[in-house]
Amino acid sequence: MTDRSRQKRYLSSTSESDQSSGDLGKTLKREKKLARTEIVDKQSALDQQNTMEAELRKIRQKLDKVISEDTLDKKLKPLLTKDDLKTALEAIKGEILCEVNKTTEELKAAVHVLSVENDGLKRQVAELNKQSVNQADIIKGANAAAQSNRLKVNELEQWTRKSSIRIFGIPDPKPAETAIECTEKVTSMLKDKLNMNIEEKDIDIAHRLGKFSTDGNRPIIVKFMTRKHKIEAIQKRRAMKGTRIVIREDLTAMNHKLLISAKEHANVEAVWSKDGVIFAKFHSGKIVRVEHGKPIDSLLNG
C-alpha cells in the first residue's frame, strides 16, 4: 500500500468518526431538553397542588369560624327558648288531640251504624229461625196427617176386601180363561179339597191376576157373596198343606208389604194375617200384632 492510499483511508475513517460523534451529541442534547421539560411540568403540577391545598385550608378555616358549635349555640339559643318549645309542643299536642277526637267520633258513628245493622240482622235471624221452626212443625204435622190418612185409606181398602181371598197354585193352562171358567175351577176345588158346601152363585167374581206365563200359574182373586164363606175357606186352608195350592187373605199393598217385612225379620218364626191384621210369632214363642210405623224390635222388647 502506498503512502497516498494510507492517507486517504485515515482521512475517511476520521471523517466517519467525527460524523458519529456529532450524531451522539445531538441525541444527548434532545434527551437533556426532554428531561428539563418533564422536571418543569412536575414542578408546575406540584405548585398547583400546593396552591389548591392552601385554598382548601383557608375555606375550612372560614367554615369553622362560621359554623362552630359556639356560633350555632349563639344563633339558636335566642330562637329556641323554653316558652317557644312549650308553645310549639302545645300546638302539636292540640293538633294531635283534634285529630284523635275527630277519628274517635268517626269510629263511634261507624260503630253505631254497625250496631244498628247488627240488631236488624239479629231480628231477621230470629224471625227466620221462628219461621223455620214453624215450617218444621207444619211439615211434621203434615207428614203425620198424611200418614194418618194413608192408614185410614188402607184400613178402608182392607175392609172392602173382607170377603175376598187369593188362591195360588190352581192350574192355569190357557191365557184366555174366562171369569166363569175361573169360578167353576174355584168352586170345584173348595168342594173337593176343603169340603165346603158352596155353589157358583156364592161367588161374586173370580179371575186371574197378572199376565199369563207358561212358567207358572197366575193367582186367582175370589170375592164371595158373604163373609162367612171367606172365613170358612181361611179356617180350612190347613187341609191344603203339602199340596201346591195356597189360600191367603186378600191384603192391600201396604198390608202385604208389612207382612213380608215381618216375615224377613231374623227373630220372627211365623207370620200370618186375620181379617187384614198382621200377626208375628217370635222364636221365643211370643205372638204380637204387627202395626205400621212400629219396628219389629220394639214389639219384641215391648
Image (tube, helix red, strand yellow):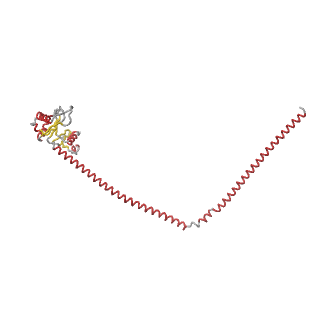
Image quadrant of residue 190?
Answer: top left
Residue that protrudes farthest toward the bottom in the picture: 83
Q: Position of residue 187 (x, y in %)?
A: 12, 35
Q: Position of residue 22 (x, y in %)?
A: 82, 42
- Horizontal side of 146 relative to 231 (left or right) equals right
- Choose between 235 and 34: the one closer to the eye: 34
Image quadrant of residue 221?
Answer: top left
Q: Position of residue 57 (x, y in %)?
A: 68, 58
Q: Vertical placement of 245 versus 292: above or below?
A: above
- Choose between 152 and 69: the one closer to the eye: 152
Q: Vertical placement of 242 versus 277: above or below?
A: above
Q: Vertical placement of 93 versus 172: above or below?
A: below
- Horizontal side of 135 relative to 116 (left or right) equals left
- Choose between 43 and 200: the one closer to the eye: 200
Q: Position of residue 252 (x, y in %)?
A: 19, 42
- Quadrant into which the N terminus falls: top right
- Horizontal side of 146 relative to 84 (left or right) equals left
Residue that protrudes farthest toward the right in the picture: 3
Instruction: Give the number of callouts.
Output: 0
Residue that protrudes farthest toward the left in the picture: 197
- Quadrant into which the C terminus falls: top left
